[in-house]
Amino acid sequence: MLDLKIVNGKIIDVENRKIIEGDIGIKDGLITCIGNVNEEAEKVIDAGGHHVSPGFIDIHMHEEDFSLTGKKEYDISETMLSMGVTTCVTGNCGNNRQSIEELYDFIAENGNPVNYMTYIGHNFLRREAGNADIYQKSSKSQIEAMQYMVKKAVDFGAVGISYGLEYCPGIDAEEAIAIAKEIKGRDDLLLAAHYRKDSLHALDAIEEMAYIGRECSIPFQISHLSSCSAYGNMAEALNLIDKVAESGQDITVDAYPYDAFSTFIGSAVFDEGCLELWNRDYDSIMLTEEPFKGRFCDKDLFEKVRKEYPNMLAVAYVMNESEIVQALNHPLVMVASDGIYRNHSGHPRGAGTFPKVIGQYVRDEKKMEFFDAIYKMTYMPAKRLKLKRKGIIKAGCDADITIFNFDTIIDKATFQNPQEKPQGIGYVLVGGKIAVENGRTINNKLGKFYRKGEA
């Protein structure tokens, strides 16, 4: 007998870009059969003609900060699950919010709403190695310490190294290359980077990232291109990335579907000259946390929070949406949220990215093609992460599945209510068990920490 059977679904065959109308049989966490499934099951889900998709895979997000949650609640992983995401990659932009061992131990003991994989972050390692000055180069001994920690993290199961070049101006390309010494040439790993500088500097930033990947001989993932180049030079940025790829270098990209970015107000992103670079004023920056939640800045408030609340998340409305759509349609770009929250405050991308792409860009505005969008949020990131059993609905694959109503799916999270659940997602399965039923979370403990190569 099957554990679970999904009937009357429009099953999305991502590989062959077609819909299979039929059933799915699930046992022991795996998909066993697809089509006309006659075998009985302990539980049956009637999909009611809705789309049955591989669970969405978010290749770029930021995990919970245990110093804020006290390990007593889930924050962003709950919103990921609610929007149909079943597997996420954490530790991006050079920043682990705690050690990967601590993250692993927590999930092993408590479970998690979604599956996690993780990078080891360069900026995190700099602090561990004793360099707390983001404007200071690392010493030879600090770089050697980071080389050891990178090897240890990869041996533990990290998917690779992430860099936060803009967040740490003291990092030069040679340091970024040097810390990867012990893993050089590993094509089973990834390097990912938050660019050096955006807007007018985007092309130089892409060149630098390509150089780092080339010198390390490791596949490279450019993070959230939407917030790097959606300032009037997206076409040039994509052309440059094409040239890098055509030269034989293994490079791909991710982007999110919002024309505003979010990061810590005290970070180097908001250093002097940023507003001139973006051709914006202080009132383009909104604060997301108390005591200034929802307030837009003026010069005095901007300087006050930079000094007194440096860890507060801020939202900067500075990008061009048409260029973001242009990026999302490029064949080397996959969908990712870059989601991050502090105490349930932040940017709606962490709760709305995937439903927004389907509901707005595919269905309502017809700016993206259906199968392209689904591929970019399922099978494409799965292949990039070398996940052999995820991102596709096929016999023998993990039963990580999202069932959504194409007619109603849409993001509901806003910049004022950034964790509002989306509409139109009926069921989410993680490991062959029901996590979300009729739009309501019934089990938020099904996710696992996957070491590289385990899935």
Image: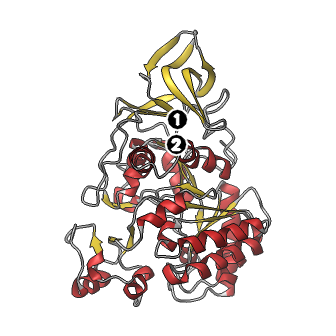
Q: From this view, report whether residue 29 is shown above or below residue 328.
A: above
**Image coordinates for residue 147, horizontal then vertical, percent:** 70, 73
Along the viewing direction, whichever of 99 and 242 lies nearer the viewer: 242
Q: How many marks?
A: 2
Q: Secondary structure at mark 1?
A: strand
Question: Residue placed at 57% from the left, 49% from the top?
Answer: 376
Q: From this view, report whether residue 315 is shown above or below residue 26.
A: below
Dot placed on the residue nearer the N-terminal end, 2 or 1? 1
Q: Residue under label 1, please give it.
A: 53
The mark closer to the camera, 2 or 1, is 2
Amino acid, disc 2:
Phe
Asked if the residue under mark 1 is in contact with the one under mark 2, i.e. CB atoms within 8 Å, the reply is: no
Q: Secondary structure at mark 2?
A: helix
Q: For residue 193, what is the image quadrant?
A: bottom right
Amino acid, disc 1:
Ser
Q: Is residue 395 left or right of residue 102?
A: right
Q: Is residue 190 left or right of residue 290?
A: right
Cα distance in 3D space between marks 2 and 1: 12 Å
**Image coordinates for residue 350, horizontal then vertical, percent:** 40, 55
Report if residue 163 is visible in the image.
no
**Image coordinates for residue 393, horizontal then vertical, percent:** 61, 32
Along the viewing direction, whichever of 271 and 36 lies nearer the viewer: 36
Question: Residue placed at 60% from the left, 19% from the top?
Answer: 35
Q: Residue under label 2, please give it.
A: 370
Q: From this view, report whether residue 324 is shown above or below residue 22.
A: below
Question: Residue placed at 47% from the left, 59% from the top?
Answer: 256
Q: Is residue 183 left or right of residue 30?
A: right
- Mark seen at residue 113: none
Q: For residue 139, what is the image quadrant?
A: bottom right
